Each structure stands twice: as structure tokens, then as C-alpha cells.
Amino acid sequence: MNAREVLSLTGQHLLLVAASTLAAAAIGLPLGIAAAHRPKFARWVLGFAGVVQTIPSLALFGFLIPLPFIGGIGSRTALVALVLYALLPIVRNTATGIAGVDPAVREAALGLGLTPRQMLWMVELPLARGVIFAGVRVATVVNVGVATIAAAIGAGGLGMYIFRGVSMVDNRLILAGAIPAALLALLLDFSLGRVEHAMNRRGSHRGAVATIAVVLVLCVAAGIAAWPKSSQRALVVGGKNFTEQLILGEILAQQIESRTGLPVDRRLNLAGSLIAHDALVAGEIDMYVEYVGTALQGVLKLPGISDPNAAAERVRLEYASRFHVEALPSLGFENTFAILVRGSDARRLHLRTISDAAPVSSTWHAGFGYEFMERQDGYPGLSRVYGLHFADAPKVLDLTLTYRALAGGQVDLIAGNSTDGLIPALDLVQLEDDRRYFPPYQAVTLVRSAALEAHPEIRAALEALSGTITAAAMQKMNAAVDLDHREPRDVAAEFIKTINRR
Amino acid sequence: MIEFKHVRCVLPNGAILLRDLSLTVEAGETLALLGRSGSGKTTTLKLINRLRRQESGEILVDGKSVTAWDTIRLRRSLGYVIQEAGLFPHFTVARNVGLVPTLEGWSTERIDARTREMMTMVGLDPAEFAARYPDELSGGQRQRAGVARALAADPPVLLMDEPFGALDPVTRAEIQREFAAWRDRLKKTVVFVTHDVREALLLGTRIAILGDGELVAHGSPEDIRNSTDPRVREFLQT
């Protein structure tokens, strides 16, 4: 994060907001005008726009991704969603503004022989313009906020910082996104408010019109200037929105850049496996790192396979035949549920496996995250398979807090993520899943076959990464970002250096 | 000039506005449509410029049925003044007065000249009032501007819907007097709606009293004053 990057993301953000609001005005004004004169149509169109507004933005992006032409990931889909959000205030204000014209004025205008077109341009629009512009202003300010969500589908903007900050539990990053976004909203609200005020005054509006024109031109110019120069059809590396994925995405990207010199675009911070998967299948991204268990059960919807090699093989075959996507050999580590105890306990009681813990667990207290308590492959099965019984019912708390609770002695056993940087940092020990209760979750790189064919040289670069990342190495890298607040980019660069030195 | 032949007008909800009206307005005449609210007098006026449509019967303007006229042409040949004037609040007085000439595509100089002439005639000094907006005028001044606007493109007919209804009695009497002078000078045919019998008797060359969608009485002010019809007497006594 640096000033230049903040500026560039602010520019992207501004361009998203300006372009979507302009498009929404271009669509919404005619709709509002039509609605003002046709009550039935008005009910229909306002109802639709109202329903769209009630859809949470992340869900709306989710709906749009699989659609042809307007869907996919990237700024185009984000624009479509932002336009949909901006429509309601613009259509509604246009319709109510026009309907609010004094009936006496309307009657006089009709009686004097204005044509419908003259009525619209000479009477309705000029008298409604303040209300209409207020709708545009509301839409603009709302979209500054909604546009932060656009980062979830790889459209860039200030949301990048917010999402990355949330996933890395880094308030500094969250603020780096939130403060410029808030300032942008305030600035736009203020300047558009001035224009609205000018519009509500009568007489010549050349000043107001000129102001709008200048603001628009500035927005678009600033956005274009700040838009990252995209190279011609670069390879695109994707990643999900948590620390480990940010690091892995950077590792893939930098490995390709350093080994092949090909330009690489990064679409990290995608909101979840399904968005990443859809993006990969649609060719919006060329590769990302997935976990075998997630691919098998979450994406392919197949039953779990406990043998790690069989599971990886099944994933490889299914992805090749269904999606023309190649699953490369594992990077070398699993990110699975990790049953954790304090290092001191493990050494004192000689605990190595979960089975070792069963006899001593009856005096222990356990703490689990919400998800682990609920999932089929979570606590209920674990307790059954290993005969784990605790002194009382497990405490349910936020996953990140369980680590601290364990280290602080409030609980004696938790289920964390096996690659979490907190494990070494807090001197926790992962007990081996000796009965293979948890499905295998090796990390594998998924690459579109088309990308491998177009750039055969990337295969060697990516395969060189196979088996190079141990769970301990991943834990360390996660810790470097989560605990030491280092940039994923720098952490990845260091890793690439170490493997290329070998 | 204007002729109603068995005109019937009904609202979509079935309420009858006019039952069977037949009435003629000669060129140069001023017809006062007199009646209480709901009598059908405003409906009668609006049927002439097609702000309302009849269910049956025929209305002729200049010998041609209003349904055969191009509606916009018809309206531009009929000046229209309503209560509170209905001036465009976002237009200056000058732009309001020059509205119809502008729509008709007159040259700027001609519009300016005509606007100044009309404003002067209705007693609004252009130097003082041209650049003002309607909300900067008094009620009487707004009404004067409304009349000037209706007359600007020199239509042969003027339709007025309770034009002086919202004014205080002194202003009202003043404008009524002046209006009669403008009308006589410009030789316009006028149809105006009023519920004020004094106004009807003062300005009308003929008076039609409407009640309940029907023509109750019809005649010169003299005829009306001398009528023995109890419904007319009732009106005269208010």
C-alpha cells in the first residue's frame, strides 16, 4: 500500500461510480419519463427497481456472474450491478418530479397548445430537474459505497483494500480503503449538492450545466489516468479473499513473471470458491489455487474421499473432463482442520495424535468456531470417531478468538486451520488426524488447459512449485502477513527467491 | 363561430357532466357561462379546446368539428386563461407572454415587440416586469400576464376559466373594467366561465346559465335580468 496505489484505486473507484451513474441516468431518465405518464408501467418498473435494491450487493454480483455478455468477473459485471442499483433513485425521482408539476401549469400548457414533446422539454423536465438531479445525487453516493463490494468480483477500486484488510484482520488496510471511499462520497455529495442547489434556482443554468460537465470530464479523465495499463491479453491469476490465497496468488503470478517474462494480471480477493470457480471456467481467470477437499465436495458436489491420492486423482480427472482445467500436482501442504493443543500440554502428556488425546480429554474444555460445530465433518463426527468427551459442552466462539483462548488457558483443545500463522506464533501443536477423519485438503493449482496450450512455457514454471510449500512454510508466510503486517507481494517474492536459489 | 350540437359528456366513472347541450357563440360575442360548481360550465369550456372529450354530439369551431381539427392548431387559435393564470414558474413574465409566438416559430424581434406590446396593453410596464418571475408578481399582475399570454399570438377566440376568481374585489373590478376595453379594442370572441352573476352581467354580451349539466337559461344580460324563471331568479338574488 502506498500513496500512488491509493490514488490509482481511488481513480478506478471514481470511474466505476461515474460510468455506472451516467449509464443509469441514460436508462433511468427515459424510464422515469415513461413511468410518469403511465401509472401501470410505473408500478412495474418501480417495483422491479425496488426489488433489485433489496438484493444484497454481494448476492447481486453472484447472480450476474453466470450470465452471458453482462456476467463474468471484472469491471463489466460490476458496472451492470452498479447501474441496477442506481436505477431506482433516478427512475423514482424522475417520475415523482414530473408527476409533481403543478396541475394548473400543466393545464395552461396544454390549453395553449404545447405538443407532448414541448410539454416534456419546456415544462416537465425544467420543473422536475431539481428532484431528478437529487435522485442522481443519491444514486452516485450510494454507488460509492456499493462499488467497494465490486472488488469481490475483481473489478478493483477501493474495496480491494477493504476486502484484503478484512481477510488479513488488518485495520490499517481497511481504513486505507474506507477513508478514501468515505471522502469520495462526501466530496461527491457536497459538489452535486451545490449543482442541485444551482438547478433549483431559476434562470439560466449554464453555470450548473458547465459544473456538471466539468465534474464528469474530470471523473472520467481521472479514472482513465489512474486505470492500470492492462497489457494485451495477459495471463490472469485469481485467488480467494483470505491471506493464504493472496500469498499463493502472488506466488503463482511472480513465478510466471520471473520464469517466463509473460505479463500477468492479478484478480485476487474473489469472494469465495464458487466465484473463483465460475471465473476460471468462464476464462476470466486462467488459474488459482484450490484445495482438493473443497474442489471435490464444494465444487464438484461429490462425496468425500479419505485417501489423499485417490481424492487428488478424482479431482484431476473430473476437472479435465468437465471443465478443461488441469489440476497440477499438490503444492506440498494441506489446509485442513487442525486439532490444536498447547505445546506445553503436548510435551508434558506426549500427545502426537488425536487418539492420544482421547483418554485425557475428559477433564478438558474445548472451544470451536461456529462452522466447525455445524458441519457434518466437524465436531459431532470427530467426537464419535475418536471418542473425545470433554468436561462440558464445547464453547462456541469466533474462529480467530479460539487460538487466543487456547493459548490463554481458557480452553484446552480447539479446531483451527492447519496453515494458520498463529500456530507457531502461539506455540500450539497440531495433533495428527491418525484415523483420517478429515477429508484431504491439499493445495493444488488449477489451470485452464487453453492457457497451458497458448503459453506452454508456464507449465514448467508452475510445476516447479509443486511440493515446494510445506505446511510450516505456509504457516510462516501467513504469520508474516497476518501478524507482522507485511505485504503478501513481498512475502511471495521472498519465497520465490528461496526456491529459485535451490 | 363556436357551436355545440347535442353534446353529452360523461366521466369514466359514469358521472354525467353535460346531458344534451346545444349552444351557439357568434363571432365578436362574449358568452358568460354561469353556474354553481358542478353545473358543467368548466366542462363546456374545456370541450372547446379538447381538454375534455364529448361522448356524443358535435362541437364546431369556425364551422369545423373539433375532432377534425389538429388539436395543437385548434388550441393555438384559442387563447386560454385560467384562474391563478397558470404561468410557468420557471419562465420570466416576458417568456411566459411570448410563449405561443415562440412555439409558432416567430422571429425573435417579432416576439420581443409583440411581448412588449401585450404587456403594455395589460398594464405591465415591460421595463419593470419583463425580467420578473411569476412569484414576484401580485395576484392581479399575474392575471394580467395570463391574459397577455393568451392574446400574444392574436387568436380570434379567448377561453377563460374563472380568470378573475382569485382576486380581491378592488383589483377584480379594475381588471374587469380594463378587460372589457381590451376585448372591444381587439374585437375578440370570448367564452368565459364564472360563478359570479355580477361579473357575468358586467362582461357578457350573452349569458348561458348552466345547472346540473343542462342549459337553464340563455340570453342577453337584459333577458337574464328580467327572467321570471325561478332558477334564474335564485341566481340573481345571491
Image: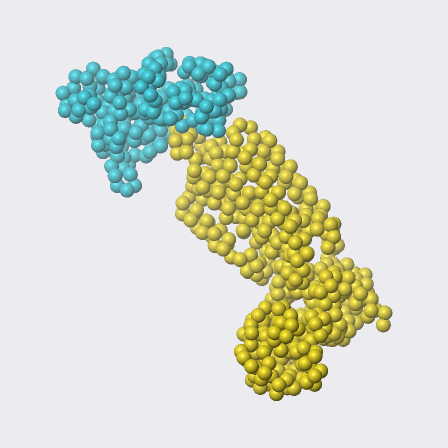
Residue A61 vertical placement versus B38 (above, below): below
The residue under the point 27% across, 16% down is: B202
Colour setup of the view? by chain
Q: Quadrant of the C terminus of chain B?
A: top left
Residue located at (67% from left, 63% from top): A168
The x and y percentages for residue A462 are 76, 69
Asked whether A163 or B165 is in front, the reply is A163
Rendered position, B81 above or below A292: above
- The answer to whether any part of residue B73 appears in the image is no
Residue found at x 58% / y 84%: A362
Asked if B84 appears above or below A328 in the picture, the reply is above
Name of the residue lying farthest toward the right: A501
In the image, A416 versus B207, the foreground residue is: A416
Hey, which quadrant is residue A379 in on the image? Answer: bottom right
Task: Using residue B136 as the reference point, say whether residue B226 is left or right of it.
Answer: left
Tell me what hue chain B is rendered in. Answer: cyan
Q: How many marks?
A: 0
Q: Residue furthest bottom?
A: A359
Q: Residue at x 30, y 31 (%)?
A: B43
Which quadrant does the N terminus of chain B fall into?
A: top left
- Quarter of the figure with residue A204: top right
Tint of chain A: yellow
Relative image position of residue A31 (x, y in whole percent): 49, 45
Residue A379: tell me if it is visible. Answer: yes
Residue placed most toward the observer, B105 or A469: A469
Where does the image place residue B54, in percent across and percent down from the top left?
A: 30, 34
Rendering coords of residue A288 (x, y %): 69, 67
